[in-house]
Image (tube, rainbow, N blue to C red):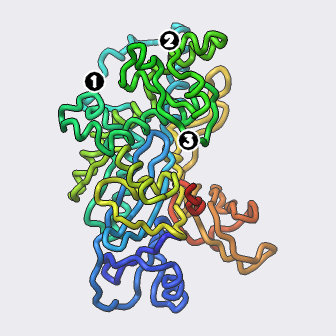
C-alpha cells in the first residue's frame, strides 16, 4: 500500500511512514487523521528530531489518465502512487449538448435582442475547457502533495515523442539519432499510432517488428509516416512486396492502413497542446522541474523490467530515475474527476420549459451531498456505525451510501465529516502486475 503522510503538531511535514506504523500511532491516541485523501495523520505530541528526506513527485500526463508517483531518489522507494482519470470527454460532450440547444433556440427565431457572440474575446493562452480541466487536475494534486509531503523536486514527461530528434537528427548529431533512445522514441510513437496491434492481422500482446509500408527496396524511407507495426509472420509474408500487392485481396484493409498512416494522434495532440501550459503552472510552484520524453520513460521501465501501468511510467520519468525502483506492495490510489455539479437551476422538459422547482441550498446542517461521513447511531431501529457518501435532504434526514448498501433516514445529529466533497471520487487500485 501507499505510505502514510505525517505532520507534526505545527503542521510541518515529516517523513512518510508505513501504514502499520500509522495504525499504531492512531490506535494509541498519539495521532489523529488529518486528511483522508491522500491519507495523512497529524501527531498530538512533539516528535523526535529526525532528518527529513527530500522526495520527488513524478508525473506522466495523458489525455485520459495521468500517472503520479512520489519517489525517494536515494532509496528508490515509491512512497505514493496514484492515477488521475480526467473528464475531458465528458466536458466536451456537455459543451456539444449546450451548443445544440443554443443552435436550436436560434433557429426558432425567438430572440428578443441582437446576437452578441461577435463581442467575445479570449485571453492569450486560452485553452478549451476540456483541456484546461486536465491541467487543473494535475496542478491541484501536486499542490495537495506539497502540503503534506517533503517534496523538493519534480519530474515531468514533457513530450510523448521526441519528434524533433526524429525529424532533425542534426540537432544532437548522428549519435543521438542512432543512439539507444532513438528506437524507443519511434517504437513508442508507433505503439500509440497503431493501437498496440499488428497492422495486417490485428493480433495483440505479441512482440512486434517495425515494418516499412513502402519497402526500402522500392524507394521507401525511414520516416515515421512510412512505418507501422507487424507481427513476425506478417512481416515475413509481406517481405519486400508493395503494400498494394500484399493487400490486393483486402481492399478495405488497404484503405484503412493508408488512411491510418497519415492520421494524426488525437490523444497525443491533446497532450502536446497542454504540455507547456502545465509546465509553466508547475514551474510557478517554485520547485526545480526535470523534463523527459516518453521514449526515455519506456527505456527506463524496460531496463528495470517493470510492468506497464500509468503510475509505474510516472515513477520512470526522467534521467533521475533510481537504478532500482521498489514497487512491491504499492497499491495506487485511483482518482476520478467528477466536477463540482452544474449551473443548471432546474430540470427542463423536452420543450425547454422548467419541470422542477429551483435547486435548494447545497449545504444542509453543515453537510453537502457527496461528503464522506461517519454516522454513529446510538438509538432507534438503525443502531450501528455507517461510513460512506451522504445525500443530504432539507429536513435533516440523510441517506448514506455504504459498502453494504444504502442506509436511508439517518439524522444529521449522528453524522460527522470524514472528507468534504472535492470534485473527485476515490478507490484503491490493484498492485502492479508481474512483468513478462
| 191 is higher (above) or lower (below) than 120 | below
Q: Does label 1 or label 3 sit earlier along the sequence? A: 1
| 139 is higher (above) or lower (below) than 53 | above
Q: Tell me, yes or no, whether the two marked residues, 1 and 3, touch with CB atoms within 8 Å.
A: no
Mark 2 and mark 3: span between their CA atoms? 55 Å
Q: Tell me, yes or no, whether the two marked residues, 2 and 3, touch with CB atoms within 8 Å.
A: no
User: Counting other residues with Cα less than 10 Å from the Cα at mark 1, is it few (<14), some (14-19), or many (20 or more)?
Assistant: few
Q: Is residue 90 visible?
A: no
Q: Is residue 138 left or right of residue 418?
A: left
At numbered mark 1, what does the secondary structure look like: helix, strand or loop? Answer: loop
Observer-nearest of 386 and 176: 176
Q: Which residue is tagged 3?
A: 207
Q: Does label 2 or label 3 sit earlier along the sequence? A: 2
Residue at figure coordinates x 51%, y 52% from the top left: 308
At numbered mark 2, what does the secondary structure look like: helix, strand or loop? Answer: helix
At numbered mark 3, what does the secondary structure look like: helix, strand or loop? Answer: loop
Q: Which residue is tagged 2?
A: 106
Residue at figure coordinates x 49%, y 69% from the top left: 2
Q: Is residue 214 visible?
A: yes
User: Counting other residues with Cα less than 10 Å from the Cα at mark 2, is it few (<14), some (14-19), or many (20 or more)?
Assistant: few
Q: Which residue is tagged 1?
A: 121
- Residue 425: name its quadrant: bottom right
How many numbered badges does the structure rendering display?
3
Q: Does label 1 or label 2 sit earlier along the sequence? A: 2
Residue 98 image offset from top left, x and y in percent: 52, 25
Residue 280 image offset from top left, x and y in percent: 24, 45
Q: Is residue 412 left or right of residue 134?
A: right
| 31 is higher (above) or lower (below) than 84 | below
Residue at figure coordinates x 25%, y 53% from the top left: 290
Mark 1 and mark 3: span between their CA atoms? 51 Å
Residue 247 image offset from top left, x and y in percent: 60, 14
- Residue 174: name its quadrant: top left
Amino acid at each position: 500500500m501507499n505510505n502514510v503522510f505525517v505532520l507534526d503538531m505545527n503542521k510541518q511535514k515529516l517523513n512518510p511512514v508505513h501504514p502499520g506504523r500509522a495504525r499504531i500511532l492512531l490506535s494509541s491516541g498519539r495521532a489523529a487523521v488529518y486528511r483522508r485523501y491522500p491519507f495523512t495523520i497529524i501527531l498530538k505530541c512533539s516528535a523526535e528530531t529526525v532528518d527529513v528526506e527530500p522526495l520527488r513527485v513524478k508525473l506522466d500526463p495523458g489525455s485520459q489518465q495521468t500517472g503520479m508517483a512520489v519517489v525517494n531518489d536515494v532509496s528508490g522507494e515509491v512512497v505514493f502512487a496514484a492515477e488521475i482519470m480526467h473528464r475531458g470527454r465528458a466536458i466536451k460532450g456537455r459543451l456539444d449538448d449546450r451548443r445544440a440547444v443554443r443552435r436550436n433556440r436560434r433557429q426558432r427565431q425567438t430572440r428578443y435582442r441582437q446576437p452578441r457572440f461577435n463581442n467575445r474575446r479570449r485571453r492569450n493562452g486560452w485553452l478549451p475547457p476540456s483541456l484546461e480541466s486536465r491541467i487543473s487536475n494535475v496542478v491541484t494534486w501536486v499542490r495537495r502533495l506539497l502540503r503534506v509531503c517533503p517534496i523538493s523536486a519534480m519530474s515531468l514527461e514533457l513530450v510523448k515523442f521526441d519528434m524533433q530528434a526524429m525529424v532533425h537528427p542534426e540537432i544532437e548529431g548522428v549519435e543521438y539519432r542512432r543512439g539507444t533512445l532513438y528506437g524507443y522514441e519511434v517504437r513508442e510513437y508507433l505503439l500509440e499510432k497503431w493501437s498496440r496491434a499488428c497492422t495486417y492481422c490485428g493480433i495483440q500482446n505479441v512482440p512486434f517488428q517495425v515494418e516499412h509500408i513502402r519497402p526500402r527496396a522500392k524507394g521507401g524511407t525511414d520516416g515515421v509516416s512510412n512505418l507501422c507495426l507487424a507481427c513476425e509472420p506478417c512481416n515475413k509474408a509481406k517481405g519486400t512486396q508493395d503494400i498494394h500487392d500484399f493487400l490486393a485481396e483486402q481492399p478495405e484493409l488497404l484503405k484503412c492502413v493508408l488512411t491510418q498512416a497519415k492520421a494524426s494522434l488525437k490523444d497525443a495532440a491533446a497532450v502536446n497542446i497542454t504540455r507547456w501550459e502545465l509546465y509553466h503552472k508547475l514551474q510557478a510552484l517554485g520547485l526545480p522541474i526535470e523534463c523527459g520524453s516518453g521514449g526515455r520513460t519506456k527505456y527506463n521501465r524496460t531496463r528495470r523490467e517493470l510492468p506497464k501501468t500509468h503510475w509505474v511510467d510516472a515513477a520512470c520519468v526522467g534521467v533521475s530515475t533510481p537504478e532500482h525502483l521498489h514497487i512491491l506492495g504499492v497499491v495506487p490510489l485511483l482518482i476520478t474527476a467528477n466536477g463540482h455539479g452544474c449551473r443548471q437551476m432546474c430540470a427542463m422538459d423536452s420543450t425547454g420549459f422548467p419541470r422542477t422547482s429551483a435547486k435548494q441550498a447545497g449545504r444542509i446542517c453543515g453537510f453537502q451531498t457527496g461528503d464522506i461521513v461517519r454516522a454513529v447511531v446510538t438509538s432507534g431501529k438503525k443502531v450501528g456505525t455507517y461510513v460512506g457518501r451522504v445525500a443530504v435532504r432539507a429536513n435533516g434526514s440523510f441517506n448514506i451510501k455504504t459498502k453494504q448498501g444504502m442506509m436511508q433516514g439517518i439524522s444529521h445529529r449522528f453524522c460527522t465529516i470524514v472528507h468534504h466533497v472535492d470534485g473527485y471520487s476515490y478507490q484503491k487500485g490493484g498492485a502492479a502486475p508481474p512483468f513478462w
